Amino acid sequence: MALSIRNQLPGTVTAITPGEVMATVAVRLDGGQDITAAITVDAVRELGLAEGSAVRALIKSTEVALTTGTVDGLSIRNRLPGTVLGVGTGGAMASVKVAVEGGELTSAITKDAVDDLGLAPGAPVVALIKATEVSLAAG
């Protein structure tokens, strides 16, 4: 199945914490980073997820925020350090490609944010992704 979601990072489930309706799923990406996905308990069951399951973390580019420094006091669990590979800008929006360990992420942010952060190839950044914005695909 082809998807329009640009960010598809392979990994392995390391833990599942079920709740009444939602579960958090810890995933070790192939690049070595840990991320968390918050998905329904039904999805965990339907995907047959368990510790050791191979998955792909799927993240829409519009859900990837970028920072150029450390951020404290933030509830966002997923923070992937990387380096800007390239920036494509239009009149209002921009697409920023970021190299992270084991792959690439694309972030769709405003052109103003690119300018304010001074983003250019080679700049260090941290990609911020809420756990509720990470979907999982089995296999």
Image (tube, rainbow, N blue to C red):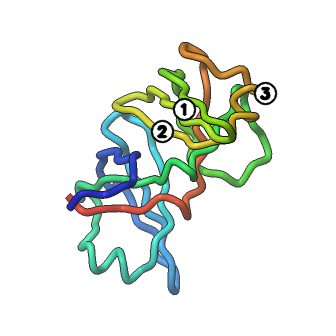
Residue carrying label 1: 96
Q: Amino acid at mark 3?
A: Asp
The one nearer the camera, 125 or 49, is 125
Local crowd at mark 3 within 10 Å, few (<14), some, or many (≥20)?
few
| Residue 132 higher or lower than 34, as above or below | below
Name the residue at the front extreme: 91
Q: Is residue 96 above or below residue 17?
A: above
Q: Residue at the bottom extreme?
A: 20
Q: Quick check: marks 3 and 1 in contact, CB under 8 Å?
A: no
Q: Residue 126 at what x, y percent from top left? A: 60, 32
In the image, is 2 to the left or to the right of 89?
Answer: left
Residue 9 - label: none
Q: SS class of the residue under badge 2? A: strand
Q: Check whether the beta carbons of the residues at disc 2 and disc 1 lie within 8 A of each other.
A: yes
Who's the residue at 55% across and 26% down the image? 87
Amino acid type for the residue under numbered disc 1? Val
- Residue at the spot 44% in from the left edge and 29% down from the top edge: 100
Taking 14 as reference, is 78 left or right?
Answer: right
Asked if the residue under mark 2 is in contact with the one under mark 3, i.e. CB atoms within 8 Å, the reply is: no
> How far across and how far down the image is residue 120, in percent?
61, 17
Q: Which residue is mark 2?
A: 106
Please report the residue visible at 56 percent of the width from the left and 51 percent of the height from the top. Answer: 62
- How many C-alpha atoms fall within 10 Å of the one at disc 2: few (<14), some, or many (≥20)? many
Circle 3 is placed at which residue position?
A: 116
